[in-house]
Structure formats: structure tokens, C-alpha cells
Amino acid sequence: MKIQNYINGQFQNPISNEWLENYCPSNGEVYGQLPNSSKADVETAYKAAKDAFPIWSQTTLDERSRILIKISELIEVNLQRLAEAESKDNGKPIRLAKSVDIPRAASNFRFFGNAITQFASESHESVGQNAINYTLRQPIGVVGCISPWNLPLYLFTWKIAPAIAAGNCVVAKPSEITPMTAYLLGDICNEAGLPKGVLNIVHGLGTKTGQAIIEHPDIKAISFTGGTATGEHIAKVAAPMFKKLSLELGGKNPNIIFADCDYDDMLNTTVRSSFANQGQICLCGSRIFVEASIYEKFKTDFVEKIKQLQVGHPSDDTTDIGALVSKSHLEKVMHYINIAKEENGIILCGGNKITVKDFENGYYLEPTVIEVSTDDCRINQEEVFGPVVTIMPFNSEDDVLHMANKVKYGLSATLWTNDLKRTMRMSNQLQAGIIWVNTWMLRDLRTPFGGVKASGVGREGGFEALRFFTEAKNVCIKY
Ligand code: NDP
């Protein structure tokens, strides 16, 4: 199977005719090829986007909304096919792709198709000066969207939908590790009547294709989700060119459990917040802090539940944990487990690769729980981004707050308590862009989404995304 670039509404081979191999994580085999696109391909995509911009930016909001909602409907019609493709490409359980990834991709288009019809700008009457100001929110032009491999279509569309809703034209690159569903989106956009050139998808390596996007002088905004080191690099390249930047980066999120919580609800949700998508979600709570009075009970119950999780082939409906995304990622996660052992972490369960019958070369790993005695260790400070969590007890609110905030990241935090005053005190002081109390990953697409510190700059979601993808221009009229 050969994936092609989607440029100007058409599928095209890379100009150089160079290709990369696409691996299937569940069996470790190459099952297709994708373009190893160069600067020349990005330039072709840019030109198509630039040519489409004058008409698309003047297309009525009703019409843009209609097309976005049509794309959303077609994603739903193709749910099964897209979920199968996502599961095969990424290694995630088909159940998850069907219930979370693909429905959310459809929601992204529907949400921004509706949101753009409600997006308004401000006016300010300058009282006593006989003047009125109004603010235009104009599309930027051609923008770049770069997304990672963990939630491929989900995060790809989370950027593209607001970008085109706001009237921009897009040059987008999905991760080279999971290009398949972005490729399939091209046909859906054509069928929905998205004018050619409004969305252009260029496949290839981050360091080559992605690099060509971020250093393109006329791509004036970059929306990026990925690792913190890549985000830092992008900021260095883009800042001197004064590009607008939205960076959604890594996390090392605390999951803080107080004794007064609803225990069963907490336990079940903590299994999910630790290991959903093989722990490869930037929002997973990878540092679990438990109040000392319930620590031993939690430890026993949690480990028992984790041992029951089924690691298996992603297409099997009984699978809870599928394959990790790539061989190199599996090795990275194993490396961190070894670091934890060297740091005297106690492996309470997991820690080993697993062989799944008939799929012996797949990238499977046991869900791993590590007991640590200090929050200073590397396994508690660095992002692993796999099925690995640490647990440790705490004695007081002050102690746990201190430990929760003592990492370079600040994406999300989860808090389990029924004490309202404590909830409000801690929510105010936790250094994170998103706080979940007595829940995890409950998403309302209108809310601001993003991190502080090394977890990123800017916010996605709702009108925040539409503000990012537009330039504010104030007009002052004296009368
Ligand atoms: P990477 O940073 O490696 O890659 C992300 C994307 O950037 C990929 O498409 C990649 O291409 C591309 N890229 C890499 N180098 C460059 C470059 N020089 N210029 C332009 N683009 C480039 O992240 P991963 O794909 O490994 O994703 C995992 C990371 O994403 C984790 O750290 C995770 O926390 C973070 N993440 C953050 C989220 C958030 O909302 N804050 C949500 C989900 C994930 P390619 O892969 O083809 O090399």
C-alpha cells in the first residue's frame, strides 16, 4: 500500500520519488510506504494553499460550516474503516480507535463547523472622544499544522478544523510513524466538497518535511503538538521569523489521591488514566501520589487490577493494552524501566516485554507499576510516554503540592477528593493548564486546552483556537 501526498485536491507521489517504510506495530512488519517529502513538495503544497486562500478566506461562514460538518459526517460514515486503519498503523486497540479516536476526529470538524458561525469580535466605543473601534478577526493566510503519532487523526483534525474554519489554507504533516488516517482524510475532504488547495497534506520525516514547513518564510503560523525538545527547536526556528506559534508539548502529570475520595470510582479511573492507549497520551497521570492512610490498600487493589489487563493484538476486542507505536519507542520505555530499577524503584507489576502468539515481532509491553520512595528520581521527573506509572505515599497537602509542582512540565493534574475547600485551594496552586477533579480526560471542546512551563505555549480549543488562527485588526473611526 502506497500513501501519497494530498496537494491541491489530488494525490501525488513525492517529487524525488523517495519513499519511507510504514511499520505495523502489532507484528513489526512493513506494510506500506509513504512519501519521504522534501522542501520541493512543501513548496508545491504551499503554492496550492496560497492560490486557494483568496477564495476560501472570502467564502461565507455558512458555506465553510456546511463543508466542515459534511467532513464530520463522512468521518462517521467511515468509522469502521478509519478505526481499523488507525489501530493497524498505531497499535492501539480497535475498541479505543472506534470509541475515542475516530469519533473525536468527527467531533472536531463538527465543533469548529458550528463554532465559526458563533465567533464574534469586539467593538469599543471611545466615550467622550466621538470614536468607535471595532476589531476584525482576519485569517492569517497559509498556516502549518504538525501532529504526533499517539492520537493520529484525533490530534491532526484538532488543528486542521479550526484552521480552515477560520478561513486559512493549510499545509499539514502527520507523524511519519502514523500517516494512514491523514491520508484517508484526503478522499473524505474531496467528497465533502472542500475546495482544492484549502488543505494540503505532506508526508515525511519531521527533520526534513516538518523542518521545511517550519522554516518556510510565508507560512506565518505553526500549530504543533509533540515532544518538548521538538517544540523548543521549532520555537528557535520560528521566533526570528515572527511566526505565530501554538505549542502543545510533553507532560509528567500528577494524579493526587486523598483518602476521602470515592474510592471505587478513583480506582477504575486511575487504571484508565495510567494505561489508556498504552500510556501514550500526553494527559496520562504517570505520577500517582496517594495519601499515606490508604496507600497500602491502594497499592494492593491497583496492582491486582493492572494484572488483569489483557495485553494483546489490537484487533482483538478483548484487548485492553495493544502494541507500543514503534520498536524505538518500546526500547525507550524499556530503558526508563531499567533506569527506575537502578534508582531502587520497586517493580510491583509488569516491567517486561510480552510475546503475543502469532505476532511475536510486535512491540508489546506489560503495564508497569513502580513504587518509588522519592519524587526526585528520573522516572518521576522525565516523560516516559508509555505504560509505566510510579506510585508513592504522601502525608500532607503541602507535601504533595510541592512534589506535584516540582517537575519541568505543567500540562494536566488529577485530584481525587470530596473536600471542596481543598479542591479549590489545590486547583489554584497546581501548576498545570488543565485540572481534573474526581474525573480524568472529560473533555468539553469549548474549554481552553494546553500547558504551562515546558508543556507548551498557547491554548487550543473553542474560541482560543479560532483566535490563534486569526489576526486581530482594530479599526478606529472618529465621527
Ligand atoms: P515529536 O516531537 O517527535 O514529533 C511530533 C511531530 O513533529 C511529528 O509529526 C514529527 O515528525 C514532527 N517533527 C519532528 N521534528 C521536527 C522538526 N524539526 N520540524 C518540524 N516538525 C518536526 O513527538 P512524538 O511524535 O514522538 O509525540 C510524542 C510527544 O508528543 C510526547 O512528548 C507527548 O507528550 C507529546 N504530546 C503532547 C500533547 C499535548 O497536547 N500537549 C498531546 C499528544 C502528544 P515525525 O514523527 O514524522 O518525525
Image (tube, rainbow, N blue to C red):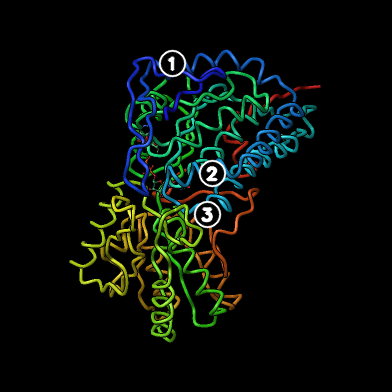
Callout 1 environment at 10 Å: few (<14), some (14 to 19), or many (20+)?
some
Q: Is mark 2 within 8 Å of ligand 1?
A: no
Local secondary structure at mark 1: helix
Callout 3 environment at 10 Å: few (<14), some (14 to 19), or many (20+)?
many
Q: Quadrant of residue 61?
A: top right
Foreground tag (1 vs 2):
2
Q: Is mark 1 within 8 Å of ligand 1?
A: no
| Mark with earlier residue (3, 2) | 3
| Mark with earlier residue (3, 1) | 1
Q: Quadrant of residue 174?
A: top left
Q: Which mark is residue 43?
A: 1
Task: Give the residue pinned by disc 2.
Answer: 154
Residue 209, position as x, y percentages in the image:
37, 26
Foreground tag (3 vs 2):
3
| Mark with earlier residue (1, 2) | 1
Q: Quadrant of residue 146?
A: top left
